[in-house]
Image (spheres, coloured by chain):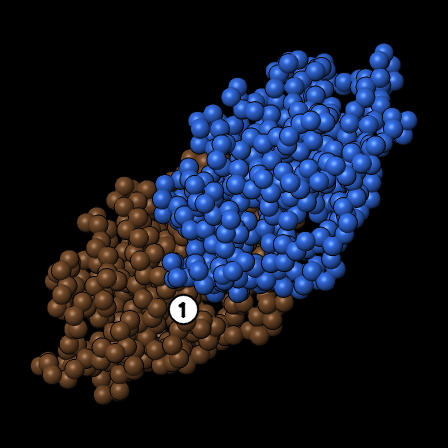
Chain colours: A brown, B blue
């Protein structure tokens, strides 16, 4: 895995666009391209949004302020004031032009968010103004207000923060569907979770812990081991100094029952070899493709070349299962809804709780992306639409004593903020 | 699928070998090659066995009578007098030289049987002389007496017949592991079972019925539809006159959750396309390879050429799982034992019951193989070591009114028997 190298490009701070700039297409309701706001309403709506302006480095994601007339809601739609958004690996790929589900730039990115309903269209029965909801979409969530179908909103439990709400959908649906729909986690099983300190890694670990006696092998750099062990990883493995295949074989000579693989390339082959008979490998990413800040053709070629290729005869001789998972390609909305309701129930029961690594205001999106890109995060990186106050310290929901990497972040963030200030001045 | 064509070769009746012929290697305990019977015991043991003498047509499986000294049991072993054996598709492949797990000829075939323990070795604690047991092995079960490790025997429930006992292991373990270890059959799921009237097909249907509200699509020729519908197939499909993909799409436009595929080749590709998102395809055979009585290079090449070949990117975009299953390659005996005990429990609860299609004495093995090869069977074809009495009618455990194809078989069998008689005379 080579995703750890520092980006070589200089950071370019994002710039606030003036309201007279034309709003990009993505300022419309993200899931309803036909619902262009009618120009009939009185006061114009000002909306901060993070827009991907082209493919490339961090500087391609810019904070823009779009002005538009008040959206005219169609039947079944609601207007949500977004309070928090999730950052996903898919957006890092998208910025590099490696995520084909993202519309072409200029486009507002963002697949998940939480907020408060400000208006409801006709025929919306079970949502009302003031409801706190989670919502998810293919893109378009990184903005202050969004228009979405009421069916795509999920009422938040009372005790859930907006940051937790924004952290839940993508990571937990991904982990849940892989563990309980594709694999079949049951008591006594063993599992390898790569990037165990990442959003999906933490979600998967928590969900494994809802099943009795599951052994979790989790890869992460050594500094994160204490945290992931507290979170439920039975055997943390430092993939940077040790061969994880050897480490697992020392403890489980026969291998493991399930491998969750977000890496691709040669790691997929290692994962396949680590499976016990009747074991399941689930590939759900190609993080090995992403090295520097920009597209790396060599890393892509290598990942592609090394990807596991199988025929059914080989699978029969091995008695193994290989699955692919990509939430972006799941178009069955009922499937997603059912899964969300199960997850919200697990949250209410106290069985899962998203771990917020750090929160960044929209102005600080570069820092947020860098944090994830350099794999410094433990848990979810959150983006906040609300403007950052000049004196405000970086927000973090990490519990006291848990914010291991906070000082490290804070330093970086203060630097970045100064750059923004200098440019503004 | 082309497995329906009539064999072009003339049937060659099997011949009884004289006791003075050297017994083939497979007359030893099938799973303990080292346990060669010592020549110390008094009276020699005469043992009828079905021996594969070379690769080819039906005539390559010959009934031989081997004479050997009484086997000296090693610690942990038992001597079983076999009462009934199962015939599997693997043996048809083996005869053609297409089953690599079978030792080279001459070899006694047979992977499963039931019988009565006649002697126990030292350190055998939980088996005693007189116990009725099921046993399974890679080969060597088609003979009157076998020496096996006591660990490989499973006590039969009181109400279970020897024929049922011999019909259980291979088909039900295969179906169980595929449905509950690899796939994850749960209430509300839908499944396509090819060859639904075959041994695995009937086992899989019965096991699906242990889960609430599972929709079973089953392919079989029209004459078998009534029987498989009674057995639990929700939608029988005649694959010979209809396109099963179209038929399923008419009822379930989105496809199915699980496909069990014993066919291989282009049917595997069709199965993959039929899967819903998060669906699972399990390939567990290549029946399309087998057309005539002998190896068909063209059919093999076609099946090989059309076999599904996948990379992980394609799987991710499809959100699907592809598994291979082959009981012969499962070396974890504990896994097999656990599964057998679960199945015996389901039998005791009345939830599963092997359906015996027909029983043939060892002399009639050609008829038995032909019946399976030509896919005339509904359920399991059983071989009986006991010599056939001249006047005896073909044995069948089929319940009254269920033996749809019995007359058809009986005619064939009478012909075949006459041929044998003619030769004997």
Q: Which residue is mark 1?
A: A91
Residue B370, horizontal then vertical, whole percent: 68, 45
To which quarter of the image does residue A301 belong? bottom right
Vertical relation: B150 (above or below) A340: above
Mark 1 nearby-residue class (10 Å; few <14, some 14–19, many ≥20): many
Residue B339 percent coordinates (x, y): 54, 33
Q: Position of residue A244 (x, y in %)?
A: 59, 49
Residue at image x 25%, y 78%? A34
Please report the residue visible at 78 percent of the width from the left and 34 percent of the height from the top: B421
Q: Chain of mark 1?
A: A
Please determine whether, in this image, residue B299 is positioned above or below residue A239.
Answer: below
Given residues B164 and A7, the one toward you in this image is B164
Residue B177 vs residue B328: left or right?
A: left
In this rendering, the count of numbered labels is 1
> Does residue A112 appear in this view?
yes
Residue B306: x and y in percent read 63, 64
Q: Quadrant of the N terminus of chain B?
A: bottom right
Between B281 and A38, the one lying in front of the other is: B281
* Quadrant of the rendering where the C terminus of chain B is positioned: top right
Q: Is residue A408 visible?
A: no
Q: Does B301 sit above or below residue B218?
A: below
Query: At numbered mark 1, what does the secondary structure look like: helix, strand or loop?
Result: helix
Q: Residue at x 68, y 53 (%)?
A: B6
- Nearer the observer, B421 or B91: B421
Position of B239 with respect to A332 (left or right) is: right
- Foreground: B313 or B93? B93
Q: Residue placed at 72% from the left, 62% from the top?
A: B298
């Amino acid at each position: 895995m080579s995703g750890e190298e520092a980006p070589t490009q200089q950071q370019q701070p994002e710039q606030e666009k003036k309201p007279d700039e034309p709003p990009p297409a993505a300022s419309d309701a993200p899931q309803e391209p036909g619902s262009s706001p009618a120009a009939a309403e009185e006061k114009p709506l000002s909306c901060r949004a993070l827009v991907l302006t082209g493919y490339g480095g961090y500087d391609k994601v810019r904070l823009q302020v779009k002005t538009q007339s008040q959206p005219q809601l169609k039947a079944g739609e609601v207007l949500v004031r977004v309070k928090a958004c999730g950052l996903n690996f898919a957006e890092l790929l998208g910025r590099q032009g490696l995520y084909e589900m993202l519309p072409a730039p200029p486009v507002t990115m963002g697949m998940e968010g939480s907020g408060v309903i400000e208006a409801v269209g006709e025929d919306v029965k079970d949502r009302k103004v003031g409801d706190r909801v989670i919502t998810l979409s293919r893109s378009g969530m990184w903005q202050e207000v969004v228009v979405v179908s009421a069916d795509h909103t999920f009422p938040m439990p009372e005790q859930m923060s907006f940051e937790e709400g924004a952290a839940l959908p993508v990571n937990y649906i991904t982990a849940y569907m892989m563990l309980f729909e594709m694999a079949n986690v049951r008591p006594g099983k063993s599992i390898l979770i790569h990037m165990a300190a990442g959003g999906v890694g933490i979600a998967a670990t928590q969900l494994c812990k809802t099943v009795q006696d599951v052994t979790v092998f989790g890869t992460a750099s050594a500094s994160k081991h204490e945290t992931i062990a507290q979170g439920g990883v039975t055997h943390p493995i430092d993939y940077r100094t040790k061969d994880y295949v050897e480490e697992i074989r020392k403890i489980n000579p026969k291998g493991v029952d399930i491998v969750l693989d977000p890496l691709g390339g040669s790691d997929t082959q290692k994962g396949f070899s680590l499976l016990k008979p009747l074991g399941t490998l689930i590939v759900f990413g190609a993080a090995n493709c992403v090295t520097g800040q920009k597209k790396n053709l060599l890393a892509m070629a290598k990942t592609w070349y090394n990807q596991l290729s199988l025929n059914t005869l080989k699978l029969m001789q091995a008695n193994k299962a290989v699955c692919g998972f990509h939430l972006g390609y799941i178009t069955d909305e009922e499937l997603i809804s059912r899964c969300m309701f199960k997850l919200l129930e697990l949250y209410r029961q106290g069985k899962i709780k998203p771990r917020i690594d750090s929160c960044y205001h929209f102005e600080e999106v570069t820092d947020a992306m860098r944090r994830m890109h350099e794999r410094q995060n433990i848990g979810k990186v959150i983006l906040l639409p609300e403007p950052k106050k000049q004196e405000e310290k970086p927000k973090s929901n990490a519990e006291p004593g848990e914010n291991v990497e906070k000082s490290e972040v804070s330093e970086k963030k203060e630097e970045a903020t100064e750059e923004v200030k200098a440019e503004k001045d």
